[in-house]
Amino acid sequence: MYETKASARSVRRPVFARFYAKVAGPGLEKAGVGEHRRRLLAGLTGQVLEIGAGHGANFVHYPPSVARVAAVEPEPRLRALAVEAARAGAVPVDVGGGLADELPFEDESFDAVVFCLTLCSVPDPHTALREGFRVLRPGGQLRFFEHVQAGSARMRRVQRVVDATVWPLLCGGCHTGRDTEAAIRRAGFTVTELDRFAFPDTRVPTPAATHILGTAVRPPGPGDGGPGTLEEGEV
C-alpha cells in the first residue's frame, strides 16, 4: 500500500459498501460486466493508476504487460476488500486511500489512468478528470467505462428526477445522467475510441443502462493546453 497524507482521507459509506460488495457487484458480474472490464484494460502497459477501484473487481483483468497498478479507493470497507483482491491480481497492485479530486501522486507519474464506474459518483467529475490529466504523462491513455446520460429525451427526464431525489442517497452518491464524454473532452483529453451501449441489455430500460467505454489520450508535448474549465451550469 502506498503511504501518503492523502491516503488517510476517506469517504465512509458502510451500508452502500456492503450492498455493492455482496449484491450489486456480483449482480453486475452475473450480467456479464467482466467482458467489458477486459475490453477496458486490454493492451495497457507500464504504470497504471485506477481511480475508484471499489472492491478490486478489475484487478484480475489487467494484462501482464502492466508493470504495476496503483489503486485509489476512498471508502474504507471497499478498500479493505480491494487489498484482499490485490493478492489474487494478475499484476502487482498497490491499494491506498485518497480522493479523486486530490490524488496523492506527482505530475506525469503514470502511463495510463483508469476510471471504471467511478465518475458517476465523484462530487465533481471535472476536478477528478483534471487530476487524472495531471498525473498522466503526455501521450498517455485515459481508459473509461461509465454509465452516462441517456440518448432519449424521455429517459433524460427520468434521470434528472432520480438524480435530484433518491438515486444518490441509495447508491453511494451515484448520478445517472452525467454527460461524461463531454466532461472528458473539457478536461483536455482527446477521445480516440468510444463505444456506447446499454448494459445490462434488458427489455425494460433503466436510468443507469446507457454506458460508454473507450480511450482518450493526453495530448503530447508542450502547449497541450491543459485541462479546460467548466462553463456555468455544466457538470
Image: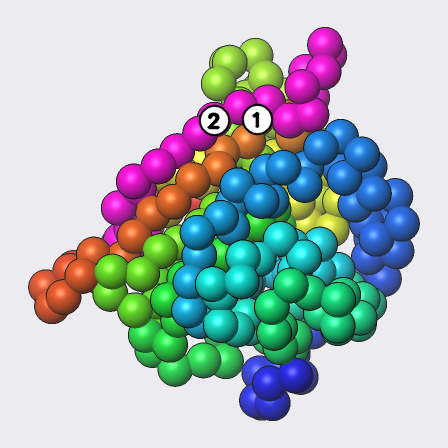
Considering only vertical position in the picture, is 92 above or below 38? below
Q: Is residue 202 magenta?
A: yes
In percent of width and height, residue 183 lies at: 38, 44
Q: Report the disc number at residue 191.
A: none
Residue position for label 1: 210
Residue type at mark 1 is Thr
Residue occupying image coordinates x 53% and y 24%? 197
- Residue 75 appears in view: no
Depth check: give the residue in front, 175 or 106.
106
Depth check: give the residue in front, 183 or 89.
89
Considering only vertical position in the picture, is 176 above or below 16? above
Element type where label 2 sits in the image: strand
Q: Which-is-in-front pick, marks 1 and 2?
A: 2
Residue position for label 2: 196
Locate the C terminus by quadrant.
Answer: top left
Residue type at mark 2 is Arg
